């Protein structure tokens, strides 16, 4: 019998931080105290449904349904369908204990889907929040005119510092802002090079400035129109042998 992703998360009983990849820019954190945080979870096929083009068809399998886990916290870095999933967020927010941190650009979607605003916190670059075990820093991001309110994220939890660069173009001058809170243990960064995002070369160059203990490339493989080439990135990283990095498959976990 194969154990599903949700069951895997529910069965964790240790007191470690677990980090799971869910594809695109999505990841799930389970703190040592059992608090679940979901970041930019894309759980449906709404990109194709809303764009009407095979280039936006979901190419990676769905390993989690919106109703399968009760999240303490959700984060949506901006309003695009693959970051604020309009089919999944309302379902996950039906849990009265779930709190959502999102960009100002998500406000229209919050109202459209009748999500209770008392459990929504709109964030801007420079804001920070403490949510249970999590200390969230909302940092600079440049996703252009498509999502001018988008933010990146530094998460501090259980002595681990995680950088989520977000859907952003290359800004080497921001390296100091990324490391303002201390050394980065884990860095998620896009490599797709479309819609204003980092290319694989830029992701590798940024890692040389940030110097994370572990780099995880993201935002590739989900939709053809989003771009991203895992083989090309693999070849790029051969030029940076001192940088520890890895691909994470769907549902794969890191334990701290």
Image (cartoon, rainbow, N blue to C red):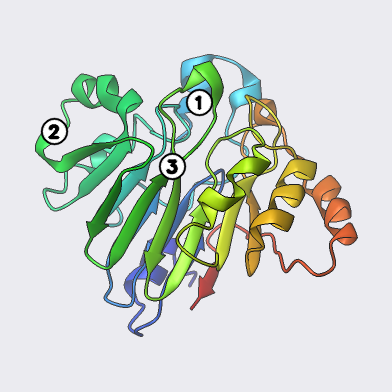
- The answer to whether any part of residue 157 appears in the image is yes
Q: Residues within 10 Å of mark 3 (few under 14, many from 20)?
A: many
Q: Nearer the viewer, mark 1 or mark 2?
A: 2
Q: Residues within 10 Å of mark 2 (few under 14, many from 20)?
A: few
| Image location (x, y in percent) of residue 233 | 80, 49
Q: Nearer the viewer, mark 2 or mark 3?
A: 2
Which residue does the numbered mark 3 point to in the structure image? Answer: 43
Q: Residue at x 46, y 17 (%)?
A: 50
Which numbered disc covers residue 47?
A: 1
Q: Seen in the image, is 89 located left or right of residue 247?
A: left
Q: Residues within 10 Å of mark 1 (few under 14, many from 20)?
A: many
Closer-to-camera residue (97/58) = 97
Q: Residue at x 55, y 21 (%)?
A: 144
Q: Seen in the image, is 135 located left or right of residue 250?
A: left
Most extreme residue toward the bottom is 14
| Image location (x, y in percent) of residue 80 | 45, 27
Q: Residue at x 16, y 26 (%)?
A: 114
């Amino acid at each position: 019998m194969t154990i599903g992703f949700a069951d895997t998360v529910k069965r964790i009983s240790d007191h470690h931080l677990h980090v799971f990849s869910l594809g695109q820019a999505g990841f799930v954190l389970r703190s040592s105290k059992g608090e679940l945080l979901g970041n930019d979870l894309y759980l449906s096929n709404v990109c194709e449904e809303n764009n009407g083009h095979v280039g936006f068809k979901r190419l990676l399998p769905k390993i989690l349904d919106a109703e399968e886990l009760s999240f303490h916290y959700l984060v949506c870095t901006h309003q695009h369908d693959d970051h604020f999933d309009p089919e999944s967020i309302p379902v996950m927010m039906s849990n009265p204990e779930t709190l959502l941190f999102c960009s100002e650009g998500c406000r229209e979607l919050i109202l459209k889907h009748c999500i209770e605003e008392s459990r929504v916190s709109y964030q801007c670059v420079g804001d920070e929040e403490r949510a249970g075990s999590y200390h969230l820093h909302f940092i600079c991001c440049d996703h252009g005119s498509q999502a001018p309110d988008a933010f990146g994220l530094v998460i501090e939890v259980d002595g681990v510092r995680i950088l989520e660069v977000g859907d952003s173009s290359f800004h080497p001058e921001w390296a100091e802002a990324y490391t303002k809170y201390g050394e980065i243990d884990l860095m998620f960064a896009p490599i797709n090079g479309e819609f204003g995002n980092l290319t694989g070369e830029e992701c590798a160059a940024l890692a040389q400035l940030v110097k994370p203990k572990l780099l995880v490339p993201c935002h590739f493989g989900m939709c053809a129109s989003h771009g991203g080439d895992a083989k090309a990135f693999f070849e790029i990283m051969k030029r940076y042998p001192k940088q520890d990095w890895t691909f994470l498959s769907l549902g794969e976990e890191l334990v701290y």
